Amino acid sequence: MSRIEAVNDFVVKFANVNGSGSASANELFAKAILRMGVPVSPRNIFPSNIQGLPTWYEVRVCEAGWLGRRGGVDMMVAMNPQTWAQDLQEISPGGYLFYDSTRPLPPEAFRADVHVIAMPVTAICNATYEDSRQRQLFKNIMVLGALSQLMGIDPKEIETLFAEQYKGKERLLDSNVRALHAGREFARDHLGDALGLQVRRADRVGQRIFVDGNAAAALGCVYGGATVCAWYPITPSSSVAEAFEKYCGKFRVDAATGEKRYAIIQAEDEIASIGMITGAGWNGARAFTATSGPGVSLMSEFLGLAYFAEIPLTIIDVQRGGPSTGMPTRTQQADLIAAAYASHGDTKHVLLLPEDPRECFEMAAAALDLADRLQTPVFLMTDLDIGMNQRLCEPLAWSDERRYDRGKVMTAAQLEAGKEFARYKDVDGDGIPWRTLPGTHPSKGAYFTRGTTRDPQARYSEKGEDYVYNVERLLKKFATAATLVPPPLLKPAARKTRLGVIYFGSTSPAMDEALQALGEADIHVDALRLRAFPFPAAVLEFIAAHEQVFVVEQNRDAQMRSLLVNELEVAPAKLTKILHFDGTPITARFITEAITRHVHALATTPR
């Protein structure tokens, strides 16, 4: 039987039980390979309960640098009997099954086209340790040791990671090192060269950093000037607020007095959290909340108020599977329409669409600027795949010369000098009125903030002409937003083509790889990565320049395609859906195969 042989280019998947302590060991596996200069892309697939259900950790090792899910599994480390049959079926023919052989299994439990690597891990741990918790935890480290021996991973890299992890807790260091080497010794003495997947040192990581999108977005909020965060815990966004608190403790505490220059409130629910940041934004603070789809649903009434009363605030939506509770620990791009049109009536919101943690950092700061500049809610639309998985990305960058864009805020001096103040009047032709902050002037610049119709001077009015003026001005402001948001990025094909593809967000790593595979198959496609809604003019120009445009997204209802059709008035037949929505991140193989099928169908369609 042939076997998969690969160096620095394979996928390993760990099947464990949630709460078993496997997550730490699995992360050490990925980071050790990264420390050897080989790019990795790990993804944690976990249940929505605390303990006891199956969990998986998939690591793509790819010296070429592709960071999207590839599709397929070359080796399954099967440590969960409950999911054995499912895990076994995922392995590619010629691949490997590593399992705990303490309990013998009948021949029919295996596949004839998969190579089996057996190690009696539980038996070894039971003979070595008396404490049940130690047996469980060190079992994972022994497996790590065995894999490091079989794959050529330098144990010194793992030991260095141990030292970093247990700094200040050195008593735990020696026991982990012993368990690591016990696993290595077993593999050396009993398993030989059973595995054809190898890791060799490379120099392909460079200066890139390894960080998750939630932490990066939180740091972007700090650098972007946010001083208020109100939130209610919801997977997968909770770690945004937790990271913001950590960074504020480091950067937002007065060194001389110890005074905290920030406010973080865990509210009683999502409705309260959005209400708090609406009040903070009205008062002039830069404020944000972090949530997911169900939270956006609850926040919609306050979002309508902030839109209509023109109050700046930022919402970080880390998307997950829906509707309702849906799949709390799976990823999707399925909140697009809910966020773009959140609230009742004619409402439109700005959406920013980062592709990786670096853009989460940059766009979180940009969202705070845009919210102030446009006086409106701004969404940062990440998802679980970006938010909770560590990703290689370029270092986060910030210029000390950058200044916050507070937009049109009238000062006391301007009011004193007699400058006209009409809170909801378009005086500059961009749809954005001037505002004042509470306490700006003792007698001038005051106005009522209301969610009801008013005239340009903020006086209550139910006159039709006042309503029409106001909502049309808001549309003009939305058009202005299209000139301020991050523009789309074009990747032209190697040769002229009538085909285009539009994609965005966490689809990007898989799309980049798919474009190369398509080109190698002589299918040439110009690619446009969207980075924001409303769509800048370049998006319509791209669609108009191609006969057929594929729209790749991770939801069932083609929500981005719907936005393109609705907002740009594009003929629906011109936009072909490429949809992936099972909760796992989209793969390069899926995109390549789907576009290839459509291209072949187009080639045989009579014209």
Image (tube, grey):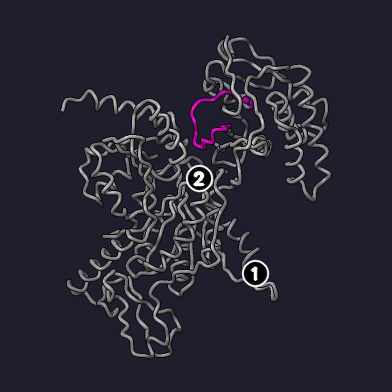
Between 450 and 439, the one nearer to me in the picture: 439
Please rate how many residues cluster around mark 2, counting C-alpha atoms within 10 Å: few if below 14, some from 14 to 19, many from 20.
Answer: many
Q: Is residue 463 visible?
A: yes
Name the residue rendered at 65%, 21% in the picture: 98
SS for dot 1: loop
How packed mark 1 is, by other alpha carbons closer than 10 Å (few <14, some 14-19, many 20 or more), is: some
Q: How many marks?
A: 2
Residue occupying the point 65% across, 28% down: 199
Which quadrant of the rendered structure holds the C terminus?
top left
Mark identifier at residue 446: none
User: Farthest residue toward the left?
Assistant: 607
* Quarter of the rendering containing residue 479: bottom left
Q: Is residue 437 magenta?
A: no
- Nearest to the observer: residue 405 or residue 441: 405
Residue 21 in sight: no
Task: Tell me the number on the disc at residue 386.
Answer: 2
**Image x and y of residue 571, in percent:** 20, 43
Query: Which amino acid, by three-letter code, is at mark 1?
Result: Val
Is residue 335 or residue 136 the one in the foreground? 335
Q: Amino acid at mark 2?
A: Ile
Is 13 situated above or below 243?
above
Q: Quadrant of the N terminus?
A: top right
Q: Nearer the viewer, residue 601 or 114?
A: 601
75 falls in the magenta region: yes
Give the vertical position of 84 relative to 35 (above or below): above
Circle 1 residue: 253
Magenta stretch in the rendered image: 60-79
Secondary structure of the residue carrying tag 2 is helix
Instruction: Give the image location of residue 155, x and y in percent.
Output: 75, 33
Q: Choose the circle earlier in sequence order: 1 or 2.
A: 1
